[in-house]
Image (spheres, rainbow, N blue to C red):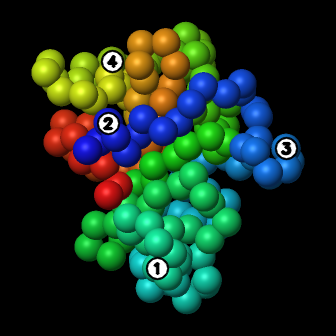
Amino acid sequence: MTAASIAGSGVRPQWSASPGQAAGSVEIVGLNGLRNVEFGDTQDELTRRGILRTDVDACGPTLAGHDTVSPIFVDDRLVLLWLGDPIHTPEGVTAGSPVAEVWSRYPSVRELDAPQGTHRFDGLLARHGDRAYLFLHDGRTVRKIIAGYADWVQRLFAEGHGPC
């Protein structure tokens, strides 16, 4: 299920916008979250602000204006964001970036091997304090980025669950 949920991201050039999206609308995810969504925000708070949508035909709540982002909540708090292109890190890494770029932009990144016999991607973990980026990759290209609390990022990778 995880491989199926993350396999949809194709390779695109860095900084490109998705079809039908203006090039200036490329957004940055930092270790605190997105510009209007922070890790630790509650579902009620995001709903009240009109950011969290539950009325969309998706596998869970979605973020208004963020078609390639899947929020993950634990005990009503935002702990992770699954991110696709065109969202990128402040260092310029996005789904579709070469793995070599992750190594050059995050020199202390740690390799995480997917369990043998699974259809999951390997990962590169860039941790800073209690926050982290997880870059899921196919050996050549970043397929998906997960950002959030480091403990939840590592747990997600170890247990192999997707946003659906």
Counting from the top left corner in percent of width and height, residue 25 is at: 80, 52
Task: Find the distance from the CA under tag 3 to the CA under tag 4.
Answer: 32 Å
Give the mark nearer the N terminus: 3 vs 4. 3
Residue identifier under label 1: 54
Q: Residue at x 72, y 43 (%)?
A: 18
The answer to whether the residues at label 1 and label 3 have Cβ atoms under 8 Å apart is: no
The reply to whether residue 132 is in sight is no
Task: Find the distance from the CA under tag 4 to the CA under tag 2.
Answer: 18 Å
Mark 2 crowdedness (10 Å alpha carbons): few <14, some 14-19, many ≥20: some
The answer to whether the residues at label 1 and label 2 have Cβ atoms under 8 Å apart is: no
Q: Residue at x 53, y 55 (%)?
A: 69
Front in this rendered view, residue 59 or 70: 59
Q: Is residue 78 left or right of residue 140?
A: left
Residue identifier under label 2: 3
Q: Which of the two marks, 3 or 4, is nearer to us in this view?
A: 3
Give the mark nearer the N terminus: 4 vs 1. 1
The answer to whether the residues at label 2 and label 3 have Cβ atoms under 8 Å apart is: no
- Which structural element holds mark 1? loop
Q: Is residue 64 above or below residue 106?
A: below
Q: Residue at x 39, y 68 (%)?
A: 60
Q: Is residue 28 left or right of residue 30?
A: right
Amino acid marked by disc 2: Ala
